[in-house]
Image (cartoon, rainbow, N blue to C red):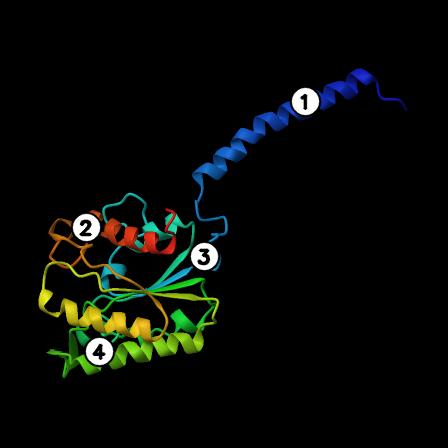
Amino acid sequence: MTIPRVTTRRSVILAILAALLIAPFIAWQGATGDERVAASPLAPRGIVVVGDSITARYNDTPGDADQGWWSVVGYHFHAKVTRYAQSGSGYLRPGHACTGDTFIDRPKAYSGAAPSLLVIEGGRNDWAACQDGRFVTASDAAIDHAVDRYLDTLQTFLPASTRIIVLGPPWGPRDQQNRQRVTAIIAAQAKLHGIQFISTTGALTADRVVDGVHPNRKGSLAIARRVIAALDPAS
């Protein structure tokens, strides 16, 4: 049976109109969805962040007052971020007032699927160690050993394709007496291991913290800017 040309032409026109109507809807769906669905050129296998309260107590909500520095970095690079963070913790000191764990006690960070980037944010708490449930001033040697051991562990378990980044401890105006020595130890160990070190000195000024220690929105953005600039100088 021969199909009339008028009917065929009408079907083609209807198909074109339907495509034109659907296309904007599909585009709108993509524009309002998760910006990190597409693979990130910088971190296609995602970013892992190991940290303390400066990472742990913040959220992943864009524009929120408590959006974490790591969240800002993740959205900038369109990368998924997975955190292994605990308040009060560090390379040396267990978190949760000596009842928690240290960075090396979070094996999922380095024994699971290898990320493109692993960023260590910490050291602020390592001026002290725990002794009988109390804080005691940590020696330089103890801090140095803890940092060395952790970086050795990461380089042992992670493939060469994972880029490891060490952040200098984000240090607000409080307890400045230990900032220089702890930061210097961490920076030296990063250099010794051939790992990129990103300084955060001066990022957490008095107007960028809520309590002398933890960043407010401006503080988290300041840390994020340091990381973004170091990872992508063209940004």
- Amino acid of disc 1: Leu
Residue 55 image label: none
Q: Which residue is mark 3?
A: 43
Cα separation between marks 2 and 1: 55 Å
Cα separation between marks 4 and 3: 30 Å
Question: Horizontal and vertical percent for residue 202?
Answer: 18, 56
Tell which circle, 3 or 2, labels the residue nearer the N-terminal end. 3
The secondary element bearing badge 4 is classed as helix
In the image shown, does 218 or 4 lie closer to the viewer?
Answer: 218
Q: Which residue is mark 1?
A: 14
Tell which circle, 4 or 2, labels the residue nearer the N-terminal end. 4
In the rendered structure, are the residues bearing label 4 and label 3 in contact, judged by CB atoms less than 8 Å apart?
A: no
Question: Horizontal and vertical percent for residue 107?
Answer: 38, 74
Could one spot residue 96 in this view of the protein?
no
Tell which circle, 3 or 1, labels the residue nearer the N-terminal end. 1
Q: Which residue is mark 2?
A: 216
- Amino acid of disc 2: Asn
Are there few (<14), some (14-19), or many (20+) residues within 10 Å of tag 2? many
Q: Which residue is mark 4?
A: 143
In the rendered structure, are the residues bearing label 3 and label 2 in contact, judged by CB atoms less than 8 Å apart?
A: no
- Amino acid of disc 4: Ile
Residue drawn at point x = 18 percent, y = 79 percent: 140
The secondary element bearing badge 2 is classed as loop
Cα separation between marks 1 and 4: 72 Å
Tell which circle, 4 or 3, labels the residue nearer the N-terminal end. 3
Tell which circle, 2 or 1, labels the residue nearer the N-terminal end. 1
Question: Horizontal and vertical percent for residue 129?
Answer: 17, 78
Are there few (<14), some (14-19), or many (20+) residues within 10 Å of tag 3? many
